[in-house]
Amino acid sequence: MLLKRRQVLMRFAAIPAAAVAASLAIPHAAAADADKALLDAAIAAAPSAREVITVAAPSFSSTDVQVSAWALLQTGWTKVFGPVPGKVGEQGIGEGKDDVPRTPFGVFALDQAFGRQENPGTTLPYTKVTDQQWWDGNQSSPTYDTMVTRATSPGPGSENLYGAGPVYDYAVHFNNNPSHTPGKGGAMFLHVTDGKPTLGCVAISKEGMVTLLKWLAPAHNPVLVTGLAG
């Protein structure tokens, strides 16, 4: 098993981070070690990360996942949260696209947080949203795939972050489309679950979201990785 993991890591180290999303199916670890294999993939793609959230799915089509969090401590990488059950997109995990309810596949920076509730204690940039905050989903807009503050919708595909309801009591953005390229999907968040598959986000319990928000820190370059388990 150790030799196999070294071989996997060597293969990830040899490819650029942009290609990792297409390669995460390589580490088919034993079920008990599935999220560790995803951790290895995240470290290879984002070597400066000291906090990693793993989202392990049993298949590409599954909407049920296991979510864990890992921290780089003096003793090495250590699981500090989970695994806990979570939900992903109605069409499982795969390539991110606009208007497709699928969770993007890969390694993504966690760059900002928001919520309908007060900041629970995160040091990530946090916005307490009102009905004036939107996530711009209009592919023709210059602010596509960003949070904007305005009285009216930016256009088709946009989402009012307060009007979405309790699922956005707490949320963290994972940046699956850093170039803001129309068509490649946006508005991807780790947020509170309502017990149902999502439109592409990753969802866990409200208590879990509060725990992770208090733990996440921008100084630790946190990332989220989605991929296959077992």
Image: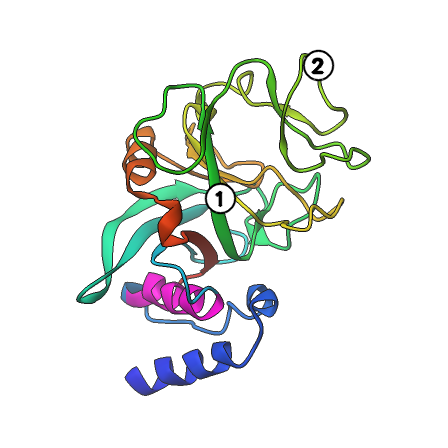
Identify the residue position indicated by label 2 in the image: 152
Which residue is painted at 56% across and 67% down in the image? 17
Q: Which is more toward the observer, 204 or 80?
A: 80
Which residue ends up furthest to the front in the rendered image? Answer: 219
Picture colour scheme: rainbow
Label annotation for residue 111: 1
User: Is there any visible trace of residue 146 in the rendered image?
Assistant: yes
Which residue is painted at 41% across and 53% down in the image? 221
Start and end of the magenta stretch?
33-45
Label annotation for residue 173: none
Q: Amino acid at mark 1?
A: Asp
In the figure, is residue 212 to the left or right of 14?
left
Q: Amino acid at mark 2?
A: Thr
- Magenta residue check for 155: no
**Spatial separation of the CA atoms under disc 2 and disc 1:** 25 Å
- The percent coordinates of residue 56 (x first, y second) are 41, 56
Question: Under tag 1, what secondary structure?
Answer: strand
Image quarter where the C terminus lies is bottom left
Relative vertical location of residue 116 with respect to residue 16 in this rendering, above or below: above
| Among the 4 quarters of the image, the one containing residue 210 | top left
